[in-house]
Image (spheres, coloured by chain):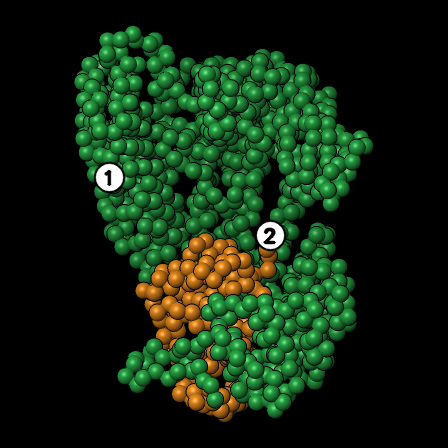
Chain colours: A orange, B green
Amino acid sequence: MELCPSVKNVLLLDSEGNRVAAKYYCDDWPTNSAKEAFEKAVFTKTQKTNARTEAEIAMIENNVVVYKFVQSLHFFVTGGEDENELILATVLQGFCDAVGLLLSTCSRGHVDRREALENLDLILMCLDEIVDGGIILETDPNVIAGKVASQSVDAGGPLSEQTISQALATAREHLTRSLLN
Amino acid sequence: MAQPFVKKDDDDEEAEYSPFLGIEKGAVLQEARVFNDPQLDPRRCSQVITKLLYLLNQGETFTKIEATEVFFAVTKLFQSRDIGLRRMVYLMIKELSPCADEVIIVTSSLMKDMNSKTDMYRANAIRVLCRITDGTLLTQIERYLKQAIVDKNPVVASAALVSGIHILQTNPEIVKRWSNEVQEAVQSRAALVQFHALALLHQIRQNDRLAVSKLVTSLTRGSVRSPLAQCLLIRYTSQVIHESASNSQTGERPFFDYLESCLRHKAEMVILEAARAITELNGVTSRELTPAITVLQLFLSSSKPVLRFAAIRTLNKVAMTHPMAVTNCNIDMESLISDQNRSIATLAITTLLKTGNESSVDRLMKQITNFMSDIADEFKIVVVEAIRSLCLKFPLKYRSLMNFLSNILREEGGFEYKKAIIDSIVILIRDIPEAKESGLLHLCEFIEDCEFTYLSTQILHFLGIEGPKTSDPSKYIRYIYNRVHLENATVRASAVSTMAKFGAKVESLKPRIFVLLRRCLLDSDDEVRDRATLYLNTLGGHGSEVETDENMNEFLFGSLEVPLVNLETSLKNYEPSDESFDINSVPKEIKSQPLAEKKAPGKKPATGLAAPPSGPATTVDAYERLLSSIAEFSSFGKLFKSSAPVELTEAGTEYTVNVVKHIFDRHVVFQYNCTNTIPEVLLENVAVIVDSSDAEEFSEVASKPLPSLPYDSPGQTFVAFEKPDGVTAIGKFSNILKFIVKEVDPSTGEAEEDGVEDEYQLEDLEVVAADYILKVGVSNFRNAWESMGADYERVDEYGLGPRENLTEAVNAVINLLGMQPCEGTEVVPSNSRSHSCLLSGVYIGNVKVLVRLSFGIDGQRDVAMKLAVRSEDESVSDAIHEIVASG
């Protein structure tokens, strides 16, 4: 019996259901088409719900899926049928808020699909810091964002939120500008 | 500069813009050449890696050559000291998952990073290296990993611990050497480190029960702070409780205080975990349940949907076994029916259906009717199934529930949903005689306008069996004959068969049926014509020779005696020749009797129309077929009862054995299901030596050893005993498994010639009085009780001594008698001082028995019981009292 809480996948889709970033940690969906089919099922089932103020929850294909929408971004975390829903919700909150924190410190300050794609490197690093091979690595959004942000500046002492924002503001500006040229 | 980023025209919508629009794998791979530049541009390199990762994330794949090229190019980037770029390099290496000889290239760079002064480098390098490395390299870096586990930086420690959890799957012997460091990390002040360390420590020790128990004992005293670690500890604790439960039946449950204290934790996830652990305890009492239910009830009115969902889902499960414990939450659950989240609303409805009492059914049905129109089919199916069980629980309410089912049957819905409704109606018709006529008419109306061929044919088949037995069979004929005019060939054919069944059973209808069948002789489909001709002949409609009634009945209503699988293989093997196919040549034995436990967990037994409503009935059929196929046992007569499998070995031993007790009138057969769990050995001549010196009335008459028992393919060996006719002999048997062990060469899979004789001590087995009583329910106990009459009623009173509570006393008596509780009376409302319980069953010799139990408990927890028995036989009524008196 699997006793350690585990995450089956973490998904970030846009408001049309297209994949922005996705990470799968188990073999339930072996091929890309299986993954896409699952994402489609998740998206259509949750599309009409209002998951903006509080995270919502649904059972999909015998999995527990918790989700939250921010602007045009749809965040999902999937766990097994018997998983503690609140643990999954904590992971979701960590992911959602960390991405929000990282994107809102960017040049335009929007948390939406376009910013997410333009800062895909941050999103991918963020995912890497939250779950490692299905095991929850970190759930505190400030710590996650701090770890990702510290990649872009010289790592120093403990990062307060202020320094994260400052660091990001400068680092991001450089990177996005060069990405768009 | 070649840029695949195409800017979209300004008039295009902002929302569709993507920096990756028009991106192409080939172009990006070309771009990756910048990694080889002597003067590295970190920003540009980061961009290219992001593009590569984007492609991989969208499901694009690299060929082996492409991946190798990218990998080598990426390794060049270790020259750069840019932290952001290094981080992207780590991600890229993990995504590419290089093969062993490629890994060597980056090993030294990663090991350098592992010892770097920058914590972020160290943590990430550990995770990357452990992900891609194999066993040989691991011994080289083991020293660093052990240090990292106890590192003062929590990020580094967590990275090493999580990597340890992954490595444990492939190289357990290495990770097991880290025990001391991991144990130290459990005491860490950092929340996540504590969580990861606890998870790893438990996985290292998971096969050592004593060590796990010690771990739980020491940690539950309170040094765990992190909520996630606390959740883990709760899971480990309930595992320990579960495993120790079989040893100590009496006294306080160990660690229960700890679970209860977790209900007061400040983190909601811990409270939920603890509440769920308590509700899932084996044989949980209502006193233990109360605090858990209370916290869940608070969650029901939370503003967070996730919390409401978690709570109602848990309560729904509790309601299946302890409906009375959940009734306190009924008001909160009723308000959840209008919850925005339809999953929550459905769970609330189905829970209410389980906890509701007879008087609240009508009110509840009104609420559900409004609710049904705005939920999806999948939720509707859940509700229909809940209503079906409710109806079986309160048979007197069948009228309103049947009406509800027929109403929703008329509404729009998909196949699965309609099938669930039809299945429910069929089961209600079968179990509640009063519901038959109205139920059949609902089905008839449904097939008048049914778009699903499968459902139409199923209903027609069912009508053919049940219709002729009703008071006025003729009223169904119109509905059936209409099918012949209006439907496709499949449905027409099955309508013809159904009409024939009416003709065969109801003599007065025969002439009219002949008229209808003759009309079908001109049908456009040959199957329909063939069936009509066949039935006209068998029923004598052509004035031809009429076969005997018995033959005809056998032909129309008899079941196929051979398993369909076997028939299929035999037919495939049959080659056309002068000799016609003989159905008697089809083997009746089912190959490799599947063990009951092998059933996929969580899968409900299929409830088709033609199949019996419950799973157990089919197992009995399978047992009966299995036993009758063995020559030694064929003379024993009809099988009366087969017990559920009783485990004779502990889980996880070399050989696992369980036994099924088959009871016949004058014999008892023990079926030992054996499984060999060691791949390297083959067992031969497997037999069980039974010592029956503690069971005087039994004498061994036959034993059927198992010739060979290979790895992981279960086999059965049997021992049969004779016992005096009509006596419910009881006794204790000790068992020794005897066999010849042969080693198997793992490379060829062949067994060695010579074997060694060996024995294996199994646990004892008992035949008890309950083995002689079949659990057979009655739908309406009062009717059954009245019609049985008081001729052989025996009433007596018993003192059951001090008990924990009434539930325990009720369960003890039910288990002792092995009878079926009726109308949900096995559930005792919490804190009640008295309770009545109704049981029904069939005693050996096919004697129906009904039992009325009245319990009372006094201040000293002494339980008194009044037992009233009615049966068709005086001696059986006495026998029941004897069982209780000696139990």
Helix, strand or loop under label 2: loop
The amino acid type found where label 1 is placed reads Cys
Number of the front mark, 2 or 1: 1
Q: From the viewer's perspective, tell me whether residue B734 is left or right of residue B25.
A: right
Residue at (77, 31) in percent of width and height: B740
Residue annotated with mark 1: B450
Residue at (61, 91) in percent of width and height: B39
Instruction: Give the numbered dot on residue B608.
Output: none
Disc 2/disc 1 C-alpha distance (Å):
45 Å
**Chain containing mark 1:** B
Can you say whether A128 is above or below B857 in the image? below
State whether residue B307 appears in this view.
no
The outermost residue toward the front is B577
State whether residue B34 appears in this view.
yes
Residue closest to the eye, B711 or A82:
B711
The count of marks equals 2
Tags 2 and 1 on a common chain: no
Residue annotated with mark 2: A1
Helix, strand or loop under label 1: loop
- Classify the position of the C terminus of chain B by image quarter: top right
The amino acid type found where label 2 is placed reads Met
Query: Looking at the picture, how far across and down is residue A3, in whole percent?
Result: 60, 57
**Chain containing mark 2:** A
